[in-house]
Image (tube, rainbow, N blue to C red):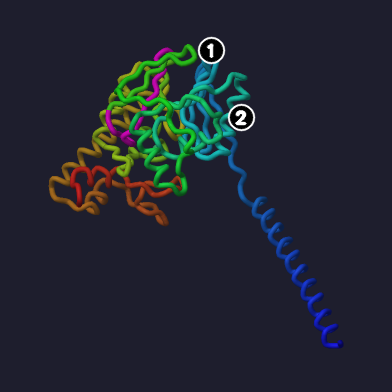
Amino acid sequence: MIESSFTGEFQRMHRQINLLFGLAVAAGLSAFASLAAAQAPAPAPFVPHQLTPNVYWVEGGGGNSGVIIGDKGVIVIDAKTTAAGGKELLDNIAKITPKPVTTVILTHSDGDHVNGLVSFPAGITIISHENNKKELQAALSAGGRGAPPADHLPTQVVSKNKENLKLGGVKFELLHWAPAHTTGDLVVYLPDQKIVFTGDIIAMQLPDPLIHLEKHGSSEGWITTVKGIVALNADKFVPGHGDVQTKAALQQRLADATAKRAKIKDLVAQGKSLDEVKAAVDPPPAPGRGAGGGGRGGPAFATFTEVVFRELKPGA
Ligand SMILES: [Zn+2]
C-alpha cells in the first residue's frame, strides 16, 4: 500500500516536472524566437522607380523587375526570389494600378528572377526563351532547394533571335543573340519608350560579366550580345541587378570586358596557368572572401577570368 502510494505520488510529480520542463522549454524557445525576430534586420522594402508614365522597375528582393502597364493588364519582367518577394512585387504593382497582371516575361532561369512566380495568379501567360524553359524543367526534376514552382513554368517560348509582340497595346521586342549569361537569355526592348531590360547580362554588383558556365553561358556570346544591346535605339538600360545604366556605361563595360578577354587569350596562348592569368588580370581577392564572384550571399560563381580560361582551355 505504502509503496504503491509512493509510486503514484512519484509518477504524479514526474508528470508535473515533465509538464513544467516542457513549458519552460516552450517559453525559452518563444523568447528566443522573438529575440531573434527582433534582432534580424527587417528585409528592406522594395523600391519602385518610374521611367515613363507606364513603365517602372522595382528594386529589391533579388533581381530587378520591370512593370509595364498596358491598356487592360500589367506585363511584368522577372518575378523576384521567393513567394514573399513575389507577393510584395504584386502589392507594389497594386499600389500603382488596379489592372491585373496578365503576363510575365523571364529574362533567364536563375531563381532570383523566377521563383517569386509561385505567388502570381494561376493562368497568366509566362514567356521565356526555349532554353530557359529547358533549364527550369531540369532544375525542377533535380528538385531540392531553389527549384522553380512546377505550376508556373513558361507557357510560351521564344525560339527565334527576335520576336515582336504587342502586349496590352505596348510594343515589345524579345531579343536573343547568343548564349551569354545563360543559354536562355532574353533581352526585353521597348522601342517606343527606348528602354531595355537586360536581365543578368548586365549585373552591376560585379565589375565583370557574370557568366554561368553550368548553364552554358559564353564570354564570346556575351560580347556579341552586349554589342547588340548597345546598338538598340534606347537610352535607359535596366540591368538584372543595380541601377539603370546609360548607353555610354554599357559601351564602357563592353570595351573593358573585350579588352580583358583579349588579354586572357594572349596569356593562355603563352601557356600561362589559371593562377598566373588571374594574377595578371584580376585585383587580389579581398581578405575573407574567396576568389569566386559571389557576394550576393549565394554561391560563389566562377569569375569572368575563370570562365574565359576554361572556354579557351577546355578540361584544363
Ligand atoms: Zn542570373
* Magenta region includes residue 299: no
Observer-nearest of 315 and 153:
153
Residue at horizontal 53 percent and vertical 12 percent from the top? 71
Q: For disc 2, does the CB lie below 8 Å from ligand 1?
A: no
Are there few (<14), some (14-19), or many (20+) residues within 10 Å of tag 1?
few
Image: magenta residue range: 178-192
Q: Which residue lies furthest to the front in this view?
A: 1
Tell me where residue 250 appears, x and y as whole percent: 35, 28
Horizontal relation, residue 173 to residue 17: left or right? left
The chief SS type of the magenta part is: loop
What amino acid type should be assigned to the residue bearing mark 2?
Asp
Observer-nearest of 208 and 114:
114
Tell me where residue 264 appears, x and y as whole percent: 21, 43
Residue tagged by mark 2?
91
* Magenta region includes residue 185: yes
Q: In which quarter of the image is ligand 1?
A: top left
Mark sitting earlier along the chain (1/2): 1
Tell me where residue 68 appears, x and y as whole percent: 50, 20
What amino acid type should be assigned to the residue bearing mark 1?
Asp
Horizontal relation, residue 165 to residue 120: left or right? left
Residue 277 in view in this figure:
yes
Q: In which quarter of the image is the N terminus?
A: bottom right
The disc placed on residue 71 is 1
Between the residue at mark 1 and the residue at mark 2, the CA separation in whole angstroms equals: 19 Å
Tell me where residue 292 appears, x and y as whole percent: 35, 50
Horizontal relation, residue 48 to residue 190: left or right? right
